[in-house]
Image (tube, rainbow, N blue to C red):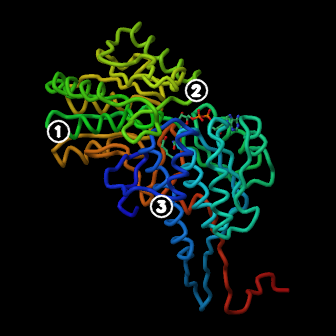
Amino acid sequence: LKAAKGGVGFPSSSLLPMTGTNYNIAKLEVINNGKSITEARVDIDVSWQSLEYYAGIAGTLAGQHIQLPGGSFAYTRREALGVCVGIGAWNYPFQIACWKSAPALACGNAMVFKPSPFTAVTAVILAEIYKEAGVPDGLFNVVQGGAETGTLLCNHPGVAKVSFTGSVPTGKKIMEMSAKTVKQVTLELGGKSPLIIFKDCELENAVRGALMANFLTQGEVCCNGTRVYVQREIMPVFLEEVVKRTKAISIGDPLLEDTRMGALITRQHLDKVLGFVSQAKKEGAKVLCGGEAFTPIEPKLKGGYYMSPCVLDNCTDDMTCVKEEIFGPVMSVMPFDTEEEVLKRANNTTFGLASGVFTRDISRAHRVAENLQAGTCFINNYNISPVEVPFGGYKQSGFGRENGQVTIEYYSQLKTVVVEMGAVDDYFNC
Ligand SMILES: NC(=O)c1ccc[n+]([C@@H]2O[C@H](COP(=O)([O-])OP(=O)(O)OC[C@H]3O[C@@H](n4cnc5c(N)ncnc54)[C@H](O)[C@@H]3O)[C@@H](O)[C@H]2O)c1
Ligand SMILES: CCCCC=O
């Protein structure tokens, strides 16, 4: 399993077959969420990699020694915050629970984790795994419930920190509640990320990248690059290729090895996503493929929340489908002419979670990455998030980070100890 490439949902062909516990968790995650088994396996890989990574870091936590005049000195200690609350979204249930609990526990905190009520199961499996590994009772706890339970946790005076993954509107409420007792907050929120494809790109990679940026986990991925800006000269060939491959995505039973797209999370969410497609048509977008409820041929799947992945052409920056997070398999494609123009358009959003650029021009790639207002910029790929690499948003996509060494700072506090080696000053002359 070491061969697995860390990713938000990267279905790596380098994955070795899973057996035993890992495979069972992946299967449960499919039943939990509806995503394909190939993706769920990657989620479980990314999850255990997170546990291993922070377990390794735990023994390296250290402060600083600062020499002061007269032999005195100060040192800093990195200490736990106390009880941390983790609140998760439904799209990566097990992975989110690991991304939060691994650094929290590594820093010496306890965690109370609340999964989304739509995907309640696998966080409990994580609690069982921790117990089996020897984590003392009470250090990692799962409470089930929805908004009411989340509210109680955020208002609890005994909680030191809330790490939240979910939508922007809920994130604002979490921040407001946490402010009452000055709790620390990490917010991993939504996005409407731009993916910029220049005419000098390696087209095959750019097309694959656009699919990776839009259709993993049925498009229900926070950092998806759903605003696809394509340089005008290559628009016809890009559209032809992207539509051909989108039509070929196999939708159906998510437990089957060949399936690449499963079911959306709920009927209500499916209707909402289909509603975005209808609205896009009304506003002048052209559906090149998909965007409809889909009924797989297997009789047992009738009534499932499936839809065909959609590519929208004729989009403009002011359309609802381009401005709002759809959180479903809908790609909006728009032409651009110059780098300056596309950067301005890409940054014209209140979100700032991720971004991407495809080009062979190395200077341009780094210049674009510098100028995009987003927490992550992928160059010549998309949706790759190994555990060593910090992940998080700019602007209303949130703050704080998950993954990487920096996350230690979000689950610990710094104590300064000042040590006098001489006499105390007789300042008051008494
Ligand atoms: N940035 C990231 O890392 C990331 C990752 C995954 C999903 N997301 C975002 O999550 C959203 C989809 O997930 P969702 O529909 O579960 O989001 P959501 O905001 O509806 O719910 C997220 C969690 O918050 C809880 N909750 C709801 N109301 C609450 C309240 N008032 N107080 C406390 N807790 C409350 C829910 O029960 C759930 O556990 C999308 O916007 C997506 O972009 C972000
Ligand atoms: C935990 C995975 C985050 C990806 C966004 O939805």
Neighbour class for label 3 at 10 Å: few (<14), some, many (≥20)?
many
- x and y, in percent, of residue 52 in the image: 51, 66
User: Quadrant of the image for the C terminus?
Assistant: bottom right
Left or right: 350 as drawn, with respect to 248: right
Q: CA distance from mark 1 to mark 3?
A: 32 Å
Please report whichever mark, 1 or 3, sits nearer to the chain's N-terminal start: 3
- x and y, in percent, of residue 127 in the image: 67, 57
Q: Nearer the viewer, residue 185 or 114?
A: 114
Please report whichever mark, 1 or 2, sits nearer to the chain's N-terminal start: 1
| Residue shown at 47% from the left, 17% from the top | 276
User: At numbered mark 1, what does the secondary structure look like: helix, strand or loop?
Assistant: loop
* Amino acid, disc 2: Thr
| Residue shown at 55% from the left, 63% from the top | 408
* Amino acid, disc 3: Gln
Q: Is mark 3 within 8 Å of ligand 2?
A: no
* Amino acid, disc 1: Cys
Neighbour class for label 2 at 10 Å: few (<14), some, many (≥20)?
some
Q: Which mark is residue 49?
A: 3
Q: Is residue 31 above or below residue 288?
A: below
Q: How many marks?
A: 3
The single residue placed furthest to the top in the displayed view is 282
Q: Which mark is residue 266?
A: 2
Q: Is residue 5 above or below residue 307?
A: below
Q: Which mark is residue 201?
A: 1
Neighbour class for label 1 at 10 Å: few (<14), some, many (≥20)?
some
Q: Nearer the viewer, residue 285 or 393?
A: 285
Q: Is residue 314 above or below residue 29?
A: above
